[in-house]
């Protein structure tokens, strides 16, 4: 893999992990491993949003 | 011990590199210290900062990690032990660094240094760099560590359990009150930046529909596609800034030129609605925008400064530093530079983040160093860049923009005359030309720091990247500052609401239920009402809100730091590490001297420009004698000055007393712990860790190999999140 491609892969990985997009992939992988039928993406994301609702995120000055 | 031939060679290379860094740093500092009245490039400040940070990170933070805290990677972190996929979650160190930085850095480090520039570039530069190395980064790192060893307990909880109920209660009240002041002052900065600026109101106003659109898009159209949604949002945001340039053609100029008082009402209503709406609608998408803008701006700033290499226009030290009669804020260099620049050097608010979400996500103990210490160094870099932006603009313009309207009369002629009395020259035509260059009606008395920073940045970017885009860059800068602040206001109001519900919930159980509407709404209303009232006081103050309130903000923030550092010292002593108590002890002592001196002066000084109560009694005496004192125009304004100054004075006294209570309570524990050698704490006992991950930003070859082996071993058992 060329350095450029590696850099792009790294950046993509970072942004997806940072923004939480990769959670869905982790969840699918976990379901596959455990032999469970995954929920729909909509349900999954809604569940995550509900968790955020009750955990105030702190933002400083 | 076997030494391979590669080891000494690596060692020699390392010594060579660090010698070079030290020499570069020393040269930059020497140039800054010795040059007077010549053309000094701003790059000297930038590189003095960068090399100092590198050395501090490499040596001092390592000393704290290995000797003082004894970070132990064989210990499982709360994230590993309690992983639940919600708040406790093993997170890659670099991703967590990003999250932590996004949480601690906002508008604070952009505003304080700009205001402190009235004393010249040197005091601010020295305090930001020395302060972060010895105080701010130490506080963040040690609090993060202490909270991590206690399953991510909050600052208030730790003070209550480790110091005492009295101290804990005082800390809880102080945290809430300080947060209110911080929200009020940040909102004041936004109001001052947007008042009478149709372009600004247009673009900032559009961020609300943009965020709402993103929220609905993410929830209903494309669930989970955060990056795609953010990209759309950023493009829309840039279009909103460009569109603002056409408000006149669109015939919206009059409708969008809004007075400060009306902006206060808009902001209070917005704050209330935003804090009771579901987070997915407004807060989460706005946070994505603000985070990506934050990173983009920092990169742009660093590149812009290096390319433009502007020359410093300010004096190294101005006469206001020694005489204490500066127009931006009153008081001498000591203690007021150290108060005005809180974020970027030492910010107590970070202790709330370092004892909140971050400690629950750390995968290995060694990461405390790069996230706690490293994250704060990065914020300090933002503060240094902001300082540079303020000291490379024409200083006549700087003072015209930052002196309250009471001094400039609010007109170009008045401002030119006023800065003339300070010893700077600028003509009314030059002032009008500067305003026209960024398509604003006026730049006179645009206090609060944001417009000055935006002007400085627009000048730097204009020089660096060319094109005829200065007006765009100015409003771009205003936009991101307002975006940071509105995000902080949204999130802060919500945090305040949760704190209030939690506290009242101790007495009245049902009120603590965060999904019970009457409680949620009333707690939000109380929080918004509190900061809204302080904001209104600031906006309508005849003496100028920033001039009056910013010292209160800085002192409040640093008093919170005093509470956090007191906790750090207490815990080190309780752990039997008295010989290392100086590490948080020196910043604590310094911070107490600074904040108590400043509090003393703001409360007891008989100089009306400085002391709140002296100011109130001066206006009271005049009012009772039937006189009017400028800048008050009538009896109502006289009364207003009296009420505001008294309120500020009472708040100031209350903060100082609360902190003294916490410290006094802690000293009792110190004596007890020193006599006993050590005392038991709530630290969670050692549990062996199974996770393998590199310790620092860049993984060494050995670490990479260890991670690969570990991943191969665990591949079938659990997803490997922390490796790479």
Image (cartoon, grey):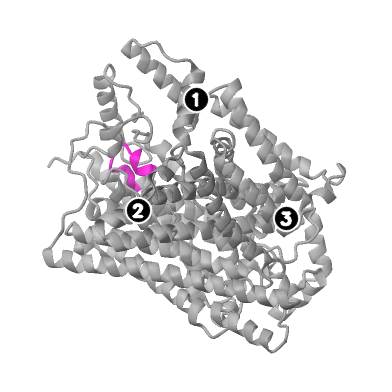
Tell whether B278 sits left or right of B658: right
B656 vs B345: above or below? below
The mark nearer the N terminus, 2 or 3, is 2
Q: Nearer the viewer, residue B448 or B37?
A: B448
- Tell me residue B420's x, y (percent): 74, 78
Q: Secondary structure at mark 3?
A: helix
Circle 2 marks a residue in which chain? Answer: B
Location of residue B632 in the rendering, given as x and y in whole percent from the top left corner: 72, 77
Quarter of the image containing the C terminus of chain B? top left
Residue A46: mark: 1
- Asked if residue B20 can be seen in this view, the reply is no
What whole-number distance in Å separates the C-alpha atoms at marks 3 and 1? 37 Å
Pointer 1 chain: A
Which contiguous range is marked in magenta?
B357-369
Q: Horizontally, is B489 left or right of B588 in the view?
A: right
Nearest to viewer (mark 2 / mark 3)? 3
Position above or below: B314 against B242: below
Asked whether B54 or A11 is in front, the reply is A11
What SS does tag 2 mark?
A: helix
Taking the image as shown, residue B228 lies to the left or right of residue B365, namely right
Q: What's the residue at 58%, 47% (across, down)?
A: B484
Q: Which residue is mark 2?
A: B155
How far apart are the two marked residues, 1 and 2, measured between alpha carbons?
31 Å
Left or right of B500 on screen, residue B231: right
Do the dots labelled 1 and 2 sit on one chain?
A: no
Q: Residue at x 56, y 62 (%)?
A: B113
* Chain assignment, label 3: B
Please check the rendered image and state whether residue B17 is part of the magenta-colored stretch, yes or no: no
């Amino acid at each position: 893999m060329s350095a450029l491609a590696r850099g792009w892969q790294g950046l993509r990985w970072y942004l997806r992990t940072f923004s939480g997009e990769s959670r869905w992939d982790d969840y699918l992988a976990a379901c596959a491993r455990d032999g469970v039928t995954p929920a729909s993406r909509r349900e999954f994301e809604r569940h995550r949003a509900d968790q955020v609702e009750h955990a105030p995120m702190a933002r400083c000055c | 011990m076997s030494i391979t031939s590669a080891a000494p060679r690596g060692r020699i290379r390392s010594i060579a590199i660090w010698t070079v860094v030290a020499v570069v740093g020393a040269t930059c500092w020497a140039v800054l210290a010795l040059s007077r009245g010549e053309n000094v490039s701003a790059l000297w400040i930038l590189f003095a900062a960068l090399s100092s940070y590198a050395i501090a990170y490499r040596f001092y933070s390592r000393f704290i990690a290995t000797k003082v805290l004894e970070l132990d990677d064989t210990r499982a972190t709360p994230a590993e032990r309690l992983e639940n996929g919600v708040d406790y979650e093993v997170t890659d160190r670099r991703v967590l660094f990003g999250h932590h930085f996004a949480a601690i850095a906002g508008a604070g480090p952009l505003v304080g240094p700009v205001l402190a520039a009235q004393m010249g570039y040197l005091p601010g530069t020295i305090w930001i760099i020395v302060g972060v190395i010895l105080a701010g980064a130490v506080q963040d790192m040690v609090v993060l560590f202490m909270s991590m060893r206690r399953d991510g307990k909050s600052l208030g909880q730790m003070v209550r359990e480790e110091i005492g109920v009295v101290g804990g209660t005082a800390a809880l009240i102080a945290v809430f009150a300080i947060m209110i002041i911080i929200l009020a002052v940040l909102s004041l900065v936004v109001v001052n930046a947007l008042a009478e600026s149709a372009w600004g109101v247009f673009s900032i106003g559009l961020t609300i529909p943009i965020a709402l659109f993103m929220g609905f898009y993410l929830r209903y159209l494309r669930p989970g596609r955060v990056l795609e949604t953010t990209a759309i949002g950023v493009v829309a945001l840039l279009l909103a800034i460009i569109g603002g340039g056409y408000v006149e053609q669109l015939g919206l100029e009059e409708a969008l030129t809004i007075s400060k008082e009306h902006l206060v009402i808009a902001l209070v209503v917005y704050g209330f609605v935003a804090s009771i709406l579901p987070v997915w609608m407004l807060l989460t998408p706005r946070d994505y925008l603000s985070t990506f803008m934050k990173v983009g701006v920092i990169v742009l700033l660093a590149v812009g400064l290096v390319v433009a290499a502007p020359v410093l226009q300010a004096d190294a030290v101005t006469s206001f530093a020694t005489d204490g009669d500066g127009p931006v804020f009153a008081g001498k260099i000591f203690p007021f530079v150290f108060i005005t620049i809180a974020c970027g050097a030492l910010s107590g608010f970070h202790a709330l983040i370092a004892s909140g979400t971050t400690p629950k996500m750390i995968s290995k103990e060694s990461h405390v160093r790069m996230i706690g210490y490293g994250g704060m160094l990065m914020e300090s870099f933002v503060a240094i860049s902001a300082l540079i932006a303020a000291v490379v603009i024409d200083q006549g313009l700087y003072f015209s923009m930052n002196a309250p309207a009471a001094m400039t009369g609010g007109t170009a002629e008045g401002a030119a005359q006023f800065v003339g009395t300070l010893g700077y020259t600028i003509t009314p035509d030059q002032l009008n030309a500067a305003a026209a260059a960024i398509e604003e009606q006026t730049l006179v008395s645009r206090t609060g720091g944001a417009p000055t920073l935006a002007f400085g940045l627009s000048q730097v970017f204009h020089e660096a990247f060319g094109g005829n885009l200065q007006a765009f860059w100015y409003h771009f800068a205003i936009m991101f500052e307002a975006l940071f602040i509105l995000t902080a206001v949204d999130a802060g109001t919500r945090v305040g609401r949760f704190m209030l519900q939690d506290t009242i919930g101790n007495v009245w159980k049902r009120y603590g239920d965060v999904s019970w509407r009457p409680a949620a709404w009333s707690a939000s209303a109380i929080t918004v009402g509190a900061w809204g009232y302080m904001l209104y006081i600031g906006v309508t103050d005849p003496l100028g809100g920033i001039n009056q309130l910013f010292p209160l903000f800085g002192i409040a923030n640093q008093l919170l730091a005093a509470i956090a550092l007191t906790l750090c010292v207490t815990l080190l002593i309780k752990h039997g590490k008295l010989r290392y108590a100086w590490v948080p002890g020196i910043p604590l002592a310094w911070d107490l001297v600074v904040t108590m001196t400043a509090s003393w002066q703001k409360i007891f000084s008989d100089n009306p420009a400085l002391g709140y109560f002296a100011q109130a009694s001066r206006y009271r005496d005049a009012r009772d004698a039937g006189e009017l004192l400028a800048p008050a125009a009538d009896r109502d304004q006289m009364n207003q000055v009296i009420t505001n100054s008294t309120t500020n004075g009472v708040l100031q006294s209350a903060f100082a007393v609360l902190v003294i209570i916490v410290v006094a309570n802690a000293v009792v524990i110190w004596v007890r712990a020193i006599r006993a050698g050590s005392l038991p704490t709530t630290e969670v006992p050692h549990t062996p860790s199974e996770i393998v991950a590199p310790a620092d930003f860049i993984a060494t070859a050995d670490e990479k190999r260890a991670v690969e082996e570990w991943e191969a071993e665990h591949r079938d058992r659990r997803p490997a999140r922390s490796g790479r």
